[in-house]
């Protein structure tokens, strides 16, 4: 393996650690976890969903989703409602508070993207995205469950 490959992996790992630390601290300030936030983002993309659909989309067990939804209901970020056409199912719906919270997170994400990448030329940024796409493609094959991400 070449030194450049090791250096690239070291940088990716450092970026992962720093972004993870920042995200965890930001979410903790809102009383959220990464898992709960991931579920909220999914609901933002899809709208109201059954817990089974959420479990499938997130690649976790229905029991796991039940625990996540319980916490989000307690926090006032989602509601559970009977499914209008399937009496066996329950719909999970984001609340207005969740919509506001996610809008704020999206704004924060845009601000961070500008801080990190605003000084890069379009060509360099395109190269970075292309390179990271290749890394992600390989990781999704190498890491169990990676294809569901």
Image (cartoon, rainbow, N blue to C red):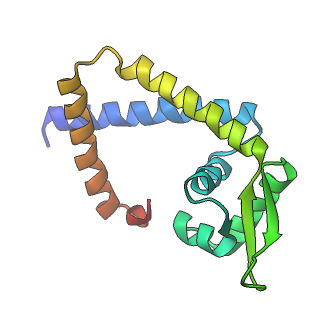
In this rendering, is residue 148 above or below 132? below
Residue positioned most to the front? 84
Residue at 22% x, 24% y is: 122
In screen coordinates, is 4 left or right of 136?
A: left
Choose top left, top right, bottom left or bottom right for residue 140.
Answer: bottom left
Q: Nearer the viewer, residue 142 or 102?
A: 102
Q: Quadrant of the N terminus?
A: top left
Residue positioned 48% across, 34% down in the render: 17
From this viewpoint, which residue is outermost toward the right? Answer: 74
Which residue is more in the foreground, 83 or 27?
A: 83
**Which residue is more in the foreground, 101 or 37?**
101
What's the residue at 16%, 33% (across, down)? Answer: 3
Give residue 93's quadrant in the image: bottom right
Query: Is residue 29 positioned above or below 141 on the image?
Result: above
**Residue 87 x/y as whole percent:** 78, 85
- For the point 32% across and 30% down, which residue is it? 11
Residue 27 in the image, given as x and y percentages of width and height: 67, 36
Image height of 113 relative to 52, above or below: above
Q: Position of residue 120 (x, y in %)?
A: 27, 18
Left or right of 10 in this view: 68:
right
| Image location (x, y in percent) of residue 54 | 61, 67
Q: Where does the C terminus fall, quadrant-wise? A: bottom left
């Amino acid at each position: 393996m070449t030194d450049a490959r090791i250096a690239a992996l070291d940088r990716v790992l450092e970026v992962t650690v720093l972004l993870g630390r920042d995200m965890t601290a930001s979410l903790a300030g809102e009383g959220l976890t990464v898992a709960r936030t991931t579920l909220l983002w999914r609901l933002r993309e899809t709208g109201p969903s059954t817990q089974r659909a959420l479990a499938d989309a997130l690649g976790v067990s229905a029991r796991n989703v039940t625990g996540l939804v319980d916490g989000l209901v307690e926090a006032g970020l989602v509601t559970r409602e009977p499914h209008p056409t399937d009496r066996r199912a329950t719909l999970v719906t984001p609340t207005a508070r969740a919509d506001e919270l996610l809008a704020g997170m999206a704004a924060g994400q845009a601000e961070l993207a500008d801080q990190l990448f605003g000084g890069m030329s379009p060509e360099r940024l395109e190269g970075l995205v292309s390179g990271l796409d290749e890394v992600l493609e390989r990781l999704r094959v190498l890491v169990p469950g990676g294809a569901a991400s």
